Image (cartoon, rainbow, N blue to C red):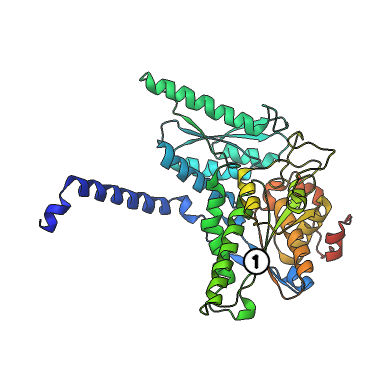
């Protein structure tokens, strides 16, 4: 059979059409806002590095178009939902999610660009900047009173219920041949594997490449520790899994005489006060005998920090925990985070939110524990712009002179 005849067979024509469609969709996707997600810069913090004798780096995830690493997660979740449920742009198909802000902002941004509705459920004690921004992005915002995860009024349970009700209503309307308002789908950032996989395939490889640049010498290459907080567990699990796998691969090559010396990566969970993840990593249990998992009303009790810290396990965090990714954890108190936020502005010129401040305190402590000469990476995950009314209101005004010391940060001293 001549080649032209083969190409003209129905099966081959269908295959070519599908491949062409996929390539066109990918090309258009890259031209939309999602094409600017990822490949964020990584830079050294000279002040913290000099204070510890280590090299401490920030992965600038706050420079994603939606302002956080959650852009990666939102894109991964939407891509997964589109593949499994054939979402239809402009049909009324709506993404529901429970979030304290950043994931919602990322979802709202991407949903608008793809023609889907977005409905966000969040606790009423979160900063107003987040809900205001979500509404400006066209999302429906439902603020609910804080409640334990065991209560149906908890924001995660409310979002799940709203999505289920919309999906069932849309399914009935479609079966009846009625023109309805589409279907509802839960993004489910806490449990979906699309979360940690976004960092396993994106953030992790980027950090490895940036910390192992070919033009660098052996002393300026590699990574000794990766430090990150956990709101869902996706970032620290996905990045940690990738980095540890790469270390094992390089060690195997070295054992066979065709690899280079590689640093052993330590993965450290940065955890704010009131969260149970520090205890989970250090002691194998979320809480002591005086507490019961899932009964607390908020994810961070008596803490000003938003976005990280949990009082329950999630599938994303459990993935890393069960596979032995986490080597250590550092508990960070609010005053330490406030002082670090001041330090970052005064000494580094970085205007960070509370989660980033927690990450940097934990990176500082990790550097001191490891000793001079080590290379540590943490995440710049949020800007202070989204935390003016709450976290930065407590931090206070920054004067013209640098006043915060490393000792102030470590000891959590009040700064007048």
Say above or below: 211 vs 72: below
Say above or below: 23 vs 255: above
Q: In the picture provided, is 322 more to the left or to the right than 290?
A: left
Identify the secondary structure beneath mark 1: loop
Q: In the picture provided, is 199 more to the left or to the right than 318?
A: left
Image quadrant in which the N terminus is located: bottom left
**What residue did someone put label 1 on?**
265
Image quadrant in which the C terminus is located: bottom right
Say above or below: 145 vs 190: above
Q: In the picture provided, is 348 more to the left or to the right than 413?
A: left
Which residue sits furthest top? 176
Whole-percent x and y of residue 49?
A: 73, 71
Q: What residue do we see at 80% from left, 63% from top?
A: 400
**Picture quadrant of residue 224:** bottom right
Which residue sits furthest front? 256
Whole-percent x and y of residue 90?
A: 41, 34
Tag 1: Cα neighbours inside 10 Å, few (<14), some, or many (≥20)?
many
Whole-percent x and y of residue 231?
A: 67, 47
Say above or below: 79 vs 57: above
Evaluate whether residue 89 shows in this view.
no
The front one of 324 and 139 is: 324
**Picture quadrant of residue 290:** top right
Evaluate whether residue 197 shows in this view.
yes
Q: What residue do we see at 49% from left, 40% from top?
A: 111
Whole-percent x and y of residue 249?
A: 54, 68
Q: In the picture provided, is 245 more to the left or to the right than 384?
A: left
Count of marks, rendered view:
1
Q: What residue do we see at 61% from left, 72% from top?
A: 222
């Amino acid at each position: 059979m001549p080649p032209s005849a083969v190409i003209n067979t129905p099966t081959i024509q269908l295959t070519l059409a599908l491949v062409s469609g996929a390539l066109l969709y990918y090309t258009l996707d890259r031209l939309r806002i999602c094409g600017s997600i990822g490949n964020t810069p990584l830079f050294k913090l000279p002040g913290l590095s000099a204070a510890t004798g280590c090299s401490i780096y920030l992965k600038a995830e706050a420079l994603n178009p939606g302002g956080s690493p959650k852009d990666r997660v939102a894109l991964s979740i939407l891509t997964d939902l589109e593949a499994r449920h054939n979402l239809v742009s402009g049909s009324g198909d709506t993404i529901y999610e429970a979030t304290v802000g950043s994931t919602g902002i990322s979802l709202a941004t991407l949903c608008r660009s793809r023609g889907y509705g977005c409905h966000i459920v969040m606790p009423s004690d979160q900063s107003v900047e987040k809900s205001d921004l979500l509404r400006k992005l066209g999302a429906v915002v439902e603020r609910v009173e804080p409640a334990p995860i065991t209560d149906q009024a908890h924001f995660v349970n409310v979002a799940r219920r709203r999505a289920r009700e919309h999906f069932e209503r849309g399914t009935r309307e479609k079966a009846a041949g009625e023109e309805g308002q589409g279907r509802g789908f839960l993004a489910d950032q806490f449990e979906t594997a699309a979360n940690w996989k976004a960092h396993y395939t994106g953030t992790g490889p980027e950090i490895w490449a940036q910390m192992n640049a070919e033009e660098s010498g052996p002393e300026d290459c590699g990574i000794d520790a990766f430090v990150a907080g956990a709101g869902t567990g996706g970032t620290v699990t996905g990045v940690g899994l990738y980095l540890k796998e790469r270390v094992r691969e390089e060690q195997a090559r070295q054992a066979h005489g065709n690899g280079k010396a590689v640093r052993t990566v330590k993965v450290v969970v940065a955890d704010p006060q009131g969260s149970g993840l520090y205890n989970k990593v250090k002691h194998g249990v979320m809480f002591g005998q005086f507490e019961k998992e899932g009964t607390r009303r908020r994810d961070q009790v008596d803490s000003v920090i938003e976005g990280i810290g949990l009082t329950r396990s999630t599938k994303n965090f459990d993935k890393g925990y069960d596979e032995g990714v986490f080597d250590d954890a550092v508990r960070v108190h609010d005053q330490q985070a406030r002082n670090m936020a001041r330090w970052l502005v005064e000494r580094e010129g970085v205007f960070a939110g509370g989660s980033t401040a927690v990450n940097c305190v934990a990176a500082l402590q990790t550097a001191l524990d490891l000793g001079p000469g080590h290379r540590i990476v943490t995440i710049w995950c949020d800007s202070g712009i989204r935390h003016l009314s709450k976290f930065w209101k407590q931090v206070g005004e920054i004067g013209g002179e640098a006043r915060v010391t490393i000792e102030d940060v470590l000891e959590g001293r009040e700064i007048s």
